Image (cartoon, grey):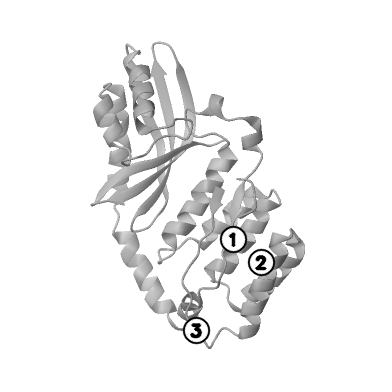
Amino acid sequence: MRKKTVIFFFLIASNICPAFSVDNFEKFNAANELILIENFSAAKNILKNILKNHPKNDQVINNIAYIEAKQGNIDTAVKILRQSISNNKNIEIIYKNLTSLYAYQANILYEEALSIKDSEKNSIKLILAKALDTMTIKNEITNNTVTKKTNIENIQSIDSGRAQEFINNWARSWENKNYQEYFNYYKKGYFPKKYKSRILWETDRKNKILSKKNIKVKILNFKVINFGNKNVLLQFTQNYNSDSFSDVVNKHATLVIINNSFKITGEYILK
């Protein structure tokens, strides 16, 4: 893509669906062409017209959010994506898009405020959905009851209490300066982008943790914003105190579920 910085908007396999006209496919492609030349107003009008007949189509919704983000309307883009979240096959990618927007809103990844250049704060890379997922459209028309049933089953598949316990235990490992246990709460291969490798990040974090005589971390106002079968988006207030520093921040944490266990994939400070 020819743009400068990274919200990943999804690509999904296509199937033929008689209910979705060839005309709408052509309109969707035309909207994409307009987006690429930054004629956002015309593109948005086309997409909204398509959305009237297919109000739950993820690709159309996604590309409208793309346009809003490109126009600087980050709050609107976040609102659109949050409204589109449901526990279906696309939850993982929609979720990633949303948390990327949250990261941009915050402008800083946790503990990286000093490492981000001003030029990096003022741009977002956007990747456009290239083709309509007609199977999604078919499901909108014929499968609403099944979708609702699936959503309920997926919601029941994750206990929010487990997520809260996970975050509390993560905080306890930090308090106890058990840095190896602390690192185990993160997904394998994870490291903040200001570091060149996991080893460099772990070395820096270990030194910071062990340099404190006393650490206290309280987790308050915990809530699960959204979750699917593999991903969880949390919000909480983190009250940190040590012998040399203290602060209170509101955070989002993104988790992935691997082998029925949570792992942290991102931490974001909310402004």
Q: Residues within 10 Å of mark 2 (few under 14, many from 20)?
A: many
Q: Where on the picture, by quarter, is residue 203?
A: top left
The disc label shown at residue 128, or none: 1
- Type of the residue with mark 3: Ile
- Type of the residue with mark 1: Leu
| Image position, residue 48 (x, y; %) | 67, 70
Count of numbered circles on the image = 3
Q: Which of marks 3 and 2 precedes in the sequence?
A: 3
Left or right of 67 in this view: 129: left
Q: Is residue 32 above or below residue 97?
A: below
Left or right of 137 in this view: 190: left
Q: Cβ–Cβ below 8 Å for labels 2 and 1?
A: yes
The answer to whether residue 48 of the structure is visible from this angle is no
| Image position, residue 216 (x, y; %) | 34, 21
The answer to whether residue 254 of the structure is visible from this angle is yes
| Image position, residue 257 (x, y; %) | 30, 50
Viewer-side residue, 227 vs 64: 64
Q: Is residue 147 above or below residue 95?
A: below
What residue is pinned by disc 3? 16
What residue is pinned by disc 2? 32
